Image (spheres, rainbow, N blue to C red):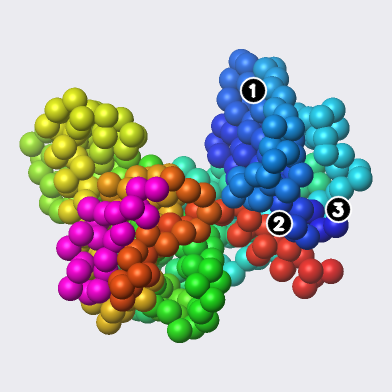
Amino acid sequence: MSVVLVVNSGSSSFKYQLIDMDTESVLASGLVERIGDDVGSSKHTVYAPNRSSSGDTGVAAFLDATYSRELPIPDHSAGFAVMLEAFAANGPSLEARPPVAVGHRVVHGGARFFEPTLITPLVEINIDELSVLAPLHNPANLQGIVAAKQAFPDVPHVAVFDTAFHQTLPPSAYTYAIDAELAAAHRIRRYGFHGTSHKFVSESAAAFLGRPLEDLRQIVFHLGNGASVTAIDRGRSVETSMGLTPLEGLVMGTRSGDIDPAALFHLARRVGMSIDDLDDLLNKRSGLLGLSGYSDYRDIRAAIERGEERALLAFEVYIHRLRAYAGAYLAQLGGVDVISFTAGVGENAPGVRSAALATLGFAGVEIDDERNTAPGRGIRIISTDASRVTVLIVPTDEELEIARQTLSIAQVGA
């Protein structure tokens, strides 16, 4: 049995999944959080047999069991000790099913990392140096790597970068029109994010349709609290909405997405807002939250039903931006064969899907209302049989994608 442990580490928490790669099923998952607080917490879930990594279950799903604890967790190393105790006490046994490798999500790989990478001391130094481009993420990712290597010193550790899939962007797509020497000196360019999800979804769509990935022009909408859209030409990312950071692009839960930079100059000059104030505004107090007072799409739908005009405007702004990017990427690709929706909003909000594509009839996009609104799980088609463009819902599974890439590197190094 080839078992891979996947770790997604934040500054005060980390998530994990133990995946049986022979069946691509999750054996256990967990969350260790409030690291560094007076009282931390851990949750460890042991899954029934035959659960896929994306959460689909069979008839034995009722056998899933979750175990919770509250205790001081001073740092990430202590957090991994708590995780190991959860495995030992509740299963599955890591002695009976030891991981052959540990895969780590790392947000920013800059232009240095374009594939899953075996973590060495030099790689750790590079991840640390790239923290200037992702100060909220890379340091936390690195904390998890250091702690995990202490907990699992005898297996390979692999970094899978959110930016890696977008390293195929052409210079015309990743270059910003600012002073070239200044941009080069400070590594200012488009990098793109959610790459692990966009790769997984585009490959899953091709497999589901039984068509070669190399024959398809695809647009993938990853719509969650963070949101991005990518144009994928025959398996290669050629354009994506996020840029130097995950702030650029679509309207998101709390992030503004695209905005005239001069608006920030205006706020600095007229209101006296500092760089930190503006950073907080655009990343934490904008997007759907800034427009409506709600960051969760479900709350916005409920507010619209209550007649709240701010919520309706937020929805309309959100859809306007989706349509703008859909049209732009249609032009970049010269047409499209498949459009996929994924992540929390993309998978669960039929109103967003239908509204975003409502004006694309000229491009051969036809949504089947019944298919779009019908409950379901797994990959499914929501376009009409007559539609020239196939529109899909594709549940993303970034952990499984990380595990697949991790195993591929671990096997090469074995």
Instruction: Using a 10 Å C-alpha cutoff, classify the residue at mark 1 as few (fewer than 14 neighbours), some (14 to 19) or many (20 or more).
Output: some
**Residue density around tag 2, few if under 14, some if 14–19, many if 20 or more, within 10 Å:** some
| Disc 1, SS | strand
Left or right: residue 263 versus residue 347 is: left
| Residue visible at 45% across and 84% down in the picture | 215
Magenta residues span: 354-374
Q: Nearer the viewer, mark 3 or mark 2?
A: 2
Q: Residue 108 lies in magenta, yes or no?
A: no
Name the N-terminal-most of marks 2 and 1.
2
Q: Which residue lies furthest to the left in this view?
A: 270
Q: How crowded is mark 3: few (under 14 residues within 10 Å), some or many (20 or more)?
A: few
Q: Are marks 2 and 1 in contact (CB under 8 Å)?
A: no
What SS does tag 2 mark? loop
- Tell me the residue that label 2 is attached to: 24
Identify which residue is drawn at 35% across, 48% down.
373
Q: In which quarter of the image is residue 45?
A: top right
N-terminal label among 1 and 3: 1
Tell me the amino acid under the disc marked 3. Asp
Judging by the rendered image, the residue that carries numbered circle 3 is: 154
The structure residue drawn at horizontal position 8% and vertical position 36%, both measured from the top left corner, is 270
Quarter of the image where the N terminus is located: bottom right
